[in-house]
Amino acid sequence: MIETQKKLIERKIEFEYLKSIIGSGYEVKIADLALRDKVAYRAARKNMQIHSAIILKIDNEFSGFFTFQINHEAKEFCLLQSAMELNKKDKEIYGMMVKEIIKQNTYDYPMIMTVSTKHDLECPKVYEELGFKTYLNLSGFEYMVYGTLEQVRMKRLAHATMTNAWTTTRADWLKMKQEWNEKIEEAGKKYNISNPKFSTRDGCWQGLNGLSNIILSHQEVKDDKIIINKEKSLNSNASVLDPVACEVILRFFMPIDGKRIYNPFGGGVQFGFVAGSYGYEYIASEIRKNQCDVNNVLCQDFKNVKWIQSDSSKYEPEEEFDLCFTCPPYYKVEKYIDYNGLIPEGELNNIDTYEQFRDTLFEGYKKAIKKLKDNRFFVVMVGDSRDKNGAYYGMEAEHELFFKGQGLHIYNKIVYLECEFTRLAQAKTTLNYRKFPKREQKIFVFYKGEIKNIKELFAPLGRL
Ligand SMILES: C[S@@+](CC[C@H](N)C(=O)[O-])C[C@H]1O[C@@H](n2cnc3c(N)ncnc32)[C@H](O)[C@@H]1O
């Protein structure tokens, strides 16, 4: 330590701020060092030299640089490329340069930086010591922030999805899912609700005909006999929503000044819980009283989160809302049971024919579309199911045509990809009659309004 201080005192260390590299007189010096450094090579490019920089001078000589960009639209401070003269590399001095950059952040924006575990100076350890936190770890690179993790949550969600194929089995997706599930479990403990993630859905799966579910049996040996308990399906097969998908949908499709969400087929607690955690108002129509009751107990700490026992083909929410997200019943895949084992009147999966089921479902959508404000998204997670002969009903395609017919734009068709493990077991049988087990569901994102307004009404993501 004393050695380091001596080293620093003996040397004259100075920093110079450049608003833009272009026009500063340092263009060539920076380009030359950037190219020799190799990792920082981008700083030699003209389109990067439009940005600001801190110049490091040791004993009056140009000895390094750090470029940065302040993005007022996304309200963030991006650290770009940095390098030190190869024979003058020194972690202490490099750290001083980063601190000098931090001083430039007079706006108190989150400061973001991507570093490599392989680099000697631009590495996680150096930045951690200066107060940066890692929010994402991707193939040898760490995405770090000087600020809070909440400030970069949207970037993390964007990285988890990125394209229209959402692979929900990746490490970061599972980590975030686990975190949400823990919060739901905590609420269950607090309010004495057992199995809060799947409450009221015990035994709802209806066998192999529908999605690629499996019914697990429980075996035990008693008095020298093998006892197989088959009467109950594992309710972890129930189609409750994935809280990470809920969060992504909420963050991406809620406008900047949006407040209210409507879900015409409420189901499990997940979406209301996520919406409530973000402080949004959430109204769900759900035909089963048992599901409404349990969800309302679990979400009582959130001010405006409510499941209303109603038939959504008849129910009309009082006020207009800013986002609709729902996951309706997939015909005959699950059985929805209320108190005393009864199926409520109007419950969609209890309707005799697929056509009647579809028309009643679409009535619910029509009522919701009417109450959706203009320039807003209507998101539906939907999966097809098969009839008695094994043919698909065509529910996904009918959704696209229905919403288009109602004047909404088909804006995204997302594939929600699940774990293949249980499907592989099924495939061994079903492929013999040429049926590929369904491993995905669709998330259709419809838009009501003028597409050109989206850029302005929805928050920018900043640098990814
Ligand atoms: C597929 S589930 C919802 C799945 C959802 N992903 C979840 O998290 O549970 C559909 C829900 O719609 C409800 N439902 C069925 N018919 C309805 C109706 N006519 N009005 C309102 N809700 C209804 C069912 O009770 C069930 O909870």
Image (cartoon, helix red, strand yellow):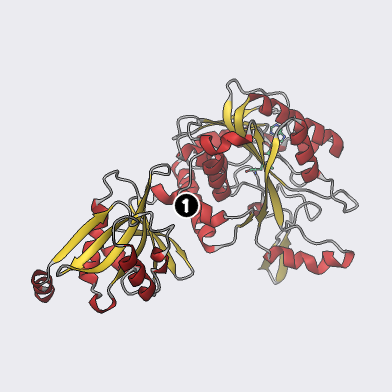
Q: Nearer the viewer, residue 433 or 76?
A: 76
The residue drawn where x is 48% and y is 40% is: 459
Residue occupied by mark 1: 155
Q: x, y percentage for residue 46? A: 42, 60
Q: Quadrant of ligand 1?
A: top right
Question: How many marks are shown on the rendered structure?
Answer: 1
Tell me if 395 is positioned left or right of 16 in this view.
Answer: right
Q: Residue at x 60, y 35 (%)?
A: 452
Q: Amino acid at mark 1?
A: Lys
List x then y, in percent, for residue 330: 75, 44
Tell me the quadrant of the picture where the N terminus can be found: bottom left
| Front-lying residue, 248 or 69 | 69
Residue extending farthest bottom:
87
Depth check: give the residue in front, 391 or 350: 391
Q: Is residue 381 above or below residue 120?
A: above
Disc 1: CA contacts within 10 A as few (<14), some (14-19) or many (>=20) = some
For label 1, being within 8 Å of ligand 1 is answered no
Q: Residue 463 at x, y = what percent? A: 45, 53
Q: Position of residue 25 (x, y in %)?
A: 28, 60
Among the 4 quarters of the image, the one containing residue 336: top right
Residue 106 vertical placement versus 228 (above, below): above
Q: Is residue 193 left or right of residue 384?
A: left
